[in-house]
Image (tube, rainbow, N blue to C red):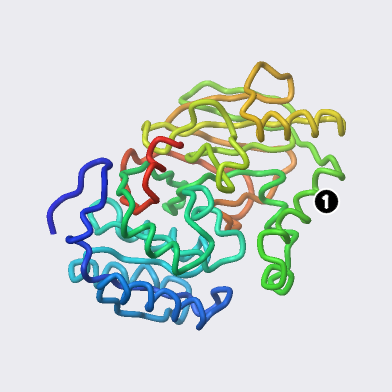
Amino acid sequence: MRAAPRSGSVDESRIRRVLLIVNPAARRGDASVRSATRAFATLGVSCDVVITLTQGDAGEVATANAADYDAIFALGGDGTAIEIIDALAPNGPPVGVLPGGTGNLLARALGIPMSVSRAVKILLQGDEIRFDLGRLGDGRRFAIGVGVGIDASMIAGTSQKWKRRAGVFAYIVAGTTHVLRRRRFTARVTVDGTTLTRKAAVVLVANFGVLLNGLVTLGDGIRHDDGKLDVCIFDPVTMIDVVRVARKLMFRDFSPDPAMTYLQGTHILVETDPPFPAQADGELVGETPFLATVEPLAARLLVPHCQINRQ
């Protein structure tokens, strides 16, 4: 299979055979698989399906079969998608992310429709990008970001039963609870050797700047393909601060604000007092401290047309 450029339109004639890797715990389960396979068939694309059994299977299946397919699609949560992206970086075939999880953070960040059949069509007729990955100190990679505070509390405070029933709304409820409690901590963030210490409610090391189909923009100029990671430190103290920061993120207003601090670099250490649970791409990854570094243009993704310039 010939090498892909950094970004550009998908050559539909090149993607004729795909592997669909399915997490059996995906929301809407069998119905989503049927929707995906019908969509591929309608577009004249041959699709083989593999159902994973345990955590780690998706990456192993992707690695073992990479040479036999023009693209590999992930149907499951963000964990399944990141596992496959991680396994195929940097030289594997492009990955198509289909919405099958609770939050579908990566799919939403990329503007991928929440309908599986529509997502298949739009990705096959869309663009291909190269994008950066982050790597934690233990070797795990992340695509969207890693952080502590509201985002991690959303995950730690959300039961599996509630997530299955309520989807992304379950995360919003848990995160709102964190905001109302106004839990703050002392953050010590070291970026490329320079350290900043301050109070915070959230510290997020971001790779993608636009989330939830463009509803939230974390900061100005945060890109997935610039060879950098961006540190977003948010510290709203009062409810007025919370509303103001939320409004800024929703309306892309990044004028100076005492509750918002931004840093950028390639080697980032985050320490907190007290220790806090951390999450990466919607999965809990232990407690602080954590180290995050960037791997420039390490992965390939299929994305909807015109998404290249949105981030």
Q: Residue furthest left?
A: 2
Can you identify the residue that label 1 sits on?
177
Question: Residue 182's spot in the image, x, y percent?
Answer: 84, 40
Asked if 4 appears above or below 28 in the picture, the reply is above
Q: Residue at x 31, y 41 (%)?
A: 297
Q: How many marks?
A: 1
Question: Residue 187's spot in the image, x, y percent?
Answer: 68, 32
Left or right: residue 166 compared with residue 93: right
Q: Residue furthest front?
A: 42
Question: Residue 259's spot in the image, x, y percent?
Answer: 73, 25
Q: Residue at x 73, y 53 (%)?
A: 172
Q: Residue at x 30, y 72 (%)?
A: 19
Residue placed most toward the observer, 198 or 103: 103
Q: Residue furthest top?
A: 256
Residue placed most toward the observer, 119 or 278: 119
Question: Residue 67's spot in the image, x, y percent?
Answer: 18, 67
Q: Residue at x 37, y 31 (%)?
A: 226
Residue placed most toward the observer, 157 or 41: 41
Asked if 37 appears above or below 211 in the picture, the reply is below
Locate the N terminus and report the quarter of the image it occupies. Answer: bottom left
Q: Amino acid at mark 1?
A: Thr
For label 1, the SS is helix
Residue 163, quarter of picture? bottom right
Left or right: residue 200 compared with residue 3: right
Asked if 237 appears above or below 48 in the picture, the reply is above
Please tell me how crowded label 1 is: few (under 14), some (14-19), or many (20+) other residues with Cα within 10 Å.
Answer: some
